[in-house]
Image (spheres, helix red, strand yellow):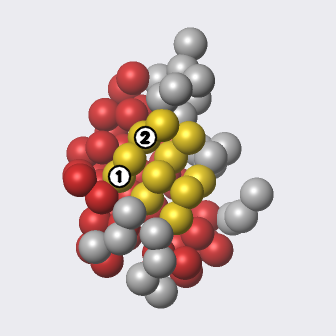
Amino acid sequence: MLSKESCAAVLNAGSNLRVSGLPTSDLVELARIARQRGVRLEIKCGLSPDSMVEIAEAGGENVLMDVSDYA
């Protein structure tokens, strides 16, 4: 798994990124970067609904959450 810093570097370089397994606070920060850079951040979710809302608010339309495995 990549670190938050590595993921941020990829987003800042202008590339889209798919991530999973990072804490909510890191995902919120990455979502903000994705929004600022105009790139897409895709998240494989296993998060609480509150966490998903927090991330969505930070990243707006630049965040895609895959909830297909959400139980």
Question: Badge 2 local density, few (<14 within 10 Å), some, or many (20+)?
Answer: some
Label 2 and label 1: CA atoms lie apart by 6 Å
Give 57 or 64, whichever is nearer the viewer. Answer: 64
2 and 1 marks in contact (CB < 8 Å): yes
Give the labeled residue for mark 1.
Answer: 63
Image quarter for residue 21?
A: top right
**Observer-nearest of 47 and 19:** 19
Label 1: which secondary element? strand
Q: Residues within 10 Å of mark 1 (few under 14, many from 20)?
A: many
Relative depth, front residue between 63 and 32: 63
Q: Is residue 22 above or below residue 48?
A: below
Q: Is residue 29 visible?
A: no
Image quadrant in which the C terminus is located: top right
Above or below, comparing residue 45 to residue 22 in the picture: above
Which residue corresponds to the image point at 43% horizontal and 40% vertical from the top-left?
65
Q: Amino acid at mark 2?
A: Met
Where in the figure is residue 6, as x and y percent of width and height?
A: 64, 74
Residue depicted at x 35% and y 71%: 39
| Residue at horizontal 55 percent and vertical 78 percent from the top | 10
At x 56% / y 41%, what residue is drawn?
Answer: 44
Q: Residue furthest front?
A: 68
Secondary structure found at label 2: strand
Q: Is residue 64 left or right of residue 2?
A: left
Q: Is residue 10 visible?
A: yes
Question: What percent of the width, then of the height, locates residue 22?
Answer: 62, 48
Residue underneath mark 2: 65
- Farthest bottom residue? 13
